[in-house]
Amino acid sequence: MSAVQHAWLGNYEVSSTTCTGLTFARHSHDECVIGVNLVGEEKVWLDRREFDAGPGSITLYNPGQIQGGGAADGAPWQFVSLYITAAQLAADLGLAHVEFERSLCFQPDLAQRLAAAVKGALSGDALVRELNEDALVLLLGEVVGVSGVRLPGAAKTGTSLISRAQELLAAQLHQSTPLEQLGDELGLSKFHLLRSFQKETGLSPRQWAMQLRTCRAKGLLRNGASASAVAHDLGFADQSHLNRHFRAAYGITPGRYQSVLKR
């Protein structure tokens, strides 16, 4: 018996599984596979070796490695998985090549954060999915680091490059700007872009764009525009999406904000 949630997030394939006694025959993948065990004990068979991966463990498989195993009959098991091609992972992290040097890392805190991002990536809310894609890129940098791969040092980006990123985001505020597009415009990997932007502003590019979108919404509402028109013009999925983010930022709904102004 098992329950599986599965989705594509940009170039990442993610899944969350809750089951009892699930086993996998020996097989391989064309992609890198990263697994996070949350509940239960996994018996892993990997390239003629066997090991156990309990809660808080991150398992790492390179493309083509023969793997198998699972949980014992009747034993509860909960895990999340992420699949990404080695070429895409390397490009996202600004590396020429990626190959995991360790198959098992016991990193409970990182495991929980990675699992939370994967689960967020399964959300029905498009913005939540995008924000968790940002989180996954940064977390993958940590995962690759603990697996034994040395990440490139961060070149000094400078405020002018981040200002350019902000200009690009502001110019396309009515729609979501993919990280790849923003990175290509600036000549940065997704990981370097996220890390540099966050260091400079305290926010990810998408978070920064949302706060600007919400700020502009306030100005339009103050000038008498309807909430539905504001939501449409500024690229919110719908009026309820605007309501949620406006209230989170200002503690009041758009409708209530306009009614207060009329007093």
Image: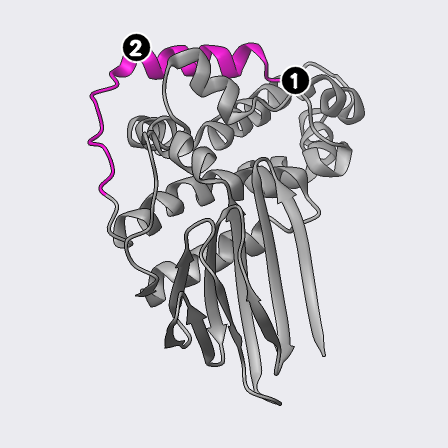
Q: Secondary structure at mark 1?
A: loop
- For marks 1 and 2, the one nearer the N-term is 2
The coloring applied to the image is one colour
Disc 1/disc 2 C-alpha distance (Å): 23 Å
Q: Which residues are magenta?
A: 150-173
Is residue 70 positioned above or below 146 on the image? below
Residue at (50% x, 57% y) in the render: 116
The amino acid type, in three-letter code, at marker 2 is Ser
Q: Is residue 258 magenta?
A: no
Residue at (51% x, 75% y) in the render: 69
Q: Is residue 152 magenta?
A: yes
Q: Residue 138, position in %: x, y? A: 38, 41
> Quadrant of residue 57 in the image?
bottom left
The amino acid type, in three-letter code, at marker 1 is His
Is residue 29 positioned above or below 138 on the image? below
Residue at (26% x, 19% y) in the render: 157
Query: What residue is shown with label 1?
Result: 174
Q: Secondary structure at mark 2?
A: helix
Q: Hey, which residue is sitting farthest bottom in the picture?
A: 74
Q: Residue 212, position in %: x, y? A: 52, 22
Query: What residue is shown with label 2?
Result: 160
Q: Quadrant of the N terminus?
A: bottom right
